[in-house]
Image (spheres, rainbow, N blue to C red):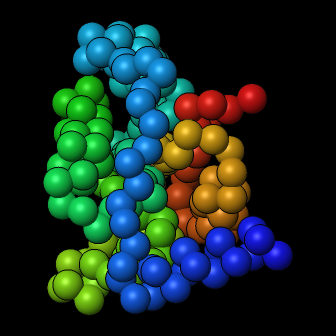
Amino acid sequence: IEQYSTALDLLDAYDHQTMERPKGNEAAYVLTYEECMHVIACMRFGKESDLFGNLGERDKAAILIIHFGTTHDDTRALTIDAINAKMKEAFPGIEVREAWTSRIILKKLKERGVERLNPAQALIQLHEQGYTHILIQSTNIIEGTEMKELRREVEGLSLNFKDIRVGNPLLYA
């Protein structure tokens, strides 16, 4: 009952918009830019990739980055926008798009007049624009509920593409 009460208090604070932003914990280890770029450089893409290396003359490829999302512009700029920019830099010539999974965040942004796509909407848009090969990479850390839902959505739309793949989260076992 105590845990239920805590959850109820949290939901009440959210509904009344009195929720305080959590302070969080200090990072156990902070990756440097050089370490991140080394990991990306070791990935096989371009002509070496069996996904993007075998595109036909009329095929189009895209990377779809899946984020949980945020309503804080400062946080978005430092995290989501930075990740998107690095992906575009790392994979020139490949279209890079994003989608957000949090329905609550998408709803709050829409109330502010900001439109973001969820993964299904983004995949439908890519299909309508003629993309045939899609690599989906989530910024989720673990293989939890969000990843399971993403994989389910992708499976339901997979027949719209010649090849579509979902990368594993960072801590995938």
* Image: 118 above or below 89: below
- 102 versus 145 height, above or below: below
For the question of whether residue 25 can be seen, the reply is yes
Question: Camera-side residue: 79 or 54?
Answer: 79
- 73 or 28: nearer the viewer: 28
* Quadrant where the N terminus is found in the figure: bottom right
Quarter residue 157 falls in: bottom right
- Residue 33 locus on image (x, y percent): 26, 17
Q: Eyeballing the image, is 119 above or below 115?
A: above
> Residue 48 in the image: x percent, y percent?
44, 17
Q: Position of residue 107 (x, y in %)?
A: 37, 83
Q: Is residue 27 left or right of residue 9?
A: left
Instruction: Spot the residue most to the right.
Output: 1
State the residue at coordinates (65%, 72%): 6
Q: Report the side of 50 relative to 41 (left or right).
A: right
Q: Is residue 126 visible?
A: no
Against 167, is 91 above or below? Answer: above
Task: Name the side, left or right, on which 79 lies relative to 173.
Answer: left
Residue beneath the point at 18% across and 60% down: 73
> Which of these two is toward me, 4 or 148?
4
Q: Give the side of residue 128 with respect to residue 77, left or right.
A: right
Residue beneath the point at 61% across and 58% down: 146
